[in-house]
Amino acid sequence: MSTIDPASQTQLDSILKKLGVNQEEAAQKKNADSLGQSDFLKLMTTQLQNQDPFAPMDNTAMVEQMAQFSQVTGITEMSQTLKGIADQLSEFRIATASNMLGNSVMVPGNYARPDDRGEIHGMLELPRSSTSTSLVFTDDNGQIMHSIDLGAQPAGLVGFSWEDMPEEMANSGQAVRIEAYADFGSGKEALTPSVFAEVLAASKGDSLTGVMLDVRDYGEIRAADVTKFRSAIK
């Protein structure tokens, strides 16, 4: 079995020094399943010592080997750096999402609860202009508690609110069902309103979903899908 003589070792040390490789740090690495720059250069030096003297390795081939190894090493280091950045961004996202706890986000749905003012606010998105637009608020038993007539509305977003809610109902904090209708010229059509709902918790999620918000009455939704945010009244 071939060994590296002192002269070759000295030459290797000189090469490593020029390349900026710290042999002491390389020796301290515990991952025995991968080769570092020092290991590669030792293998290459051994290869040169044992090459056929009548068919020596071409200088260009040796340089190409070193260039390829440096490229792979650079890609590996870049990958590790990007992973570190991704981990930091993930922590930043969850920290940002945690600031939404106790506040409200707008989500599409038919259930809403009174806010800190004892009011319900929401929005309708009309695909085209309507000749009449209305909303009906009912309790769990389907009994009508309130209704709003918005009349004719142009296409686009239309806001609505129930501000004069009875005090007892406002203090109960119970969910109210909202039915929305619009007539676009061929009779009433049901619409799904968007309402403000309280954020109860936030989770990190995964690489596909991103940060997830646990929203009251609606469960988990992607933070990326939230289009409107409202702070709680202090």
Image: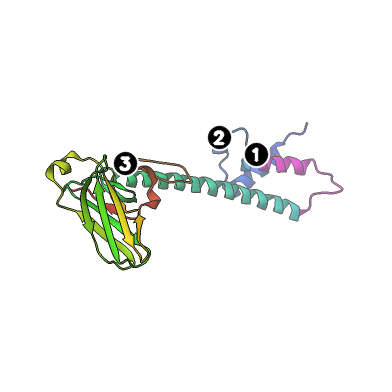
Q: For marks 1 and 2, give the CA distance.
A: 12 Å
Measuring 63% from the left and 39% from the top, which residue is drawn there? Answer: 35
What span is colored magenta in the figure? 40-59
Tag 1: amino acid: Asp
Quadrant containing the N terminus is top right
Q: Position of residue 158 (x, y in %)?
A: 28, 62
Q: Circle 3 — which element?
A: loop
Q: Is residue 153 above or below residue 67?
A: below
Measuring 27% from the left and 43% from the top, which residue is drawn there? Answer: 142
**Which of the 4 image quarters holds residue 212?**
top left
Side of 25 where 165 appears, left or right: left
Please name which of the two marks, 3 or 2, marks the residue nearer to the observer.
3
Measuring 82% from the left and 49% from the top, which residue is drawn there? Answer: 56
The answer to the question of whether label 1 and label 3 lie on touching residues, with beta carbons closer than 8 A, is no
Tag 3: amino acid: Asp
The residue singled out by tag 1 in the image is 39
* Lower position in the chain sequence, tag 3 or tag 2: 2
In the rendered image, is residue 152 in sight? yes
Q: Which mark is residue 29?
A: 2
Tag 2: amino acid: Lys
* Lower position in the chain sequence, tag 1 or tag 2: 2
Q: For marks 3 and 2, give the CA distance.
A: 52 Å
Side of 195 where 27 appears, left or right: right
* Residue, far front: 187
The residue singled out by tag 3 in the image is 217
Please name which of the two marks, 1 or 3, marks the residue nearer to the observer.
3
Most foreground residue, 122 or 135: 135
* Residue, far right: 54
Measuring 18% from the left and 48% from the top, which residue is drawn there? Answer: 233
In the rendered image, is residue 212 in sight? no
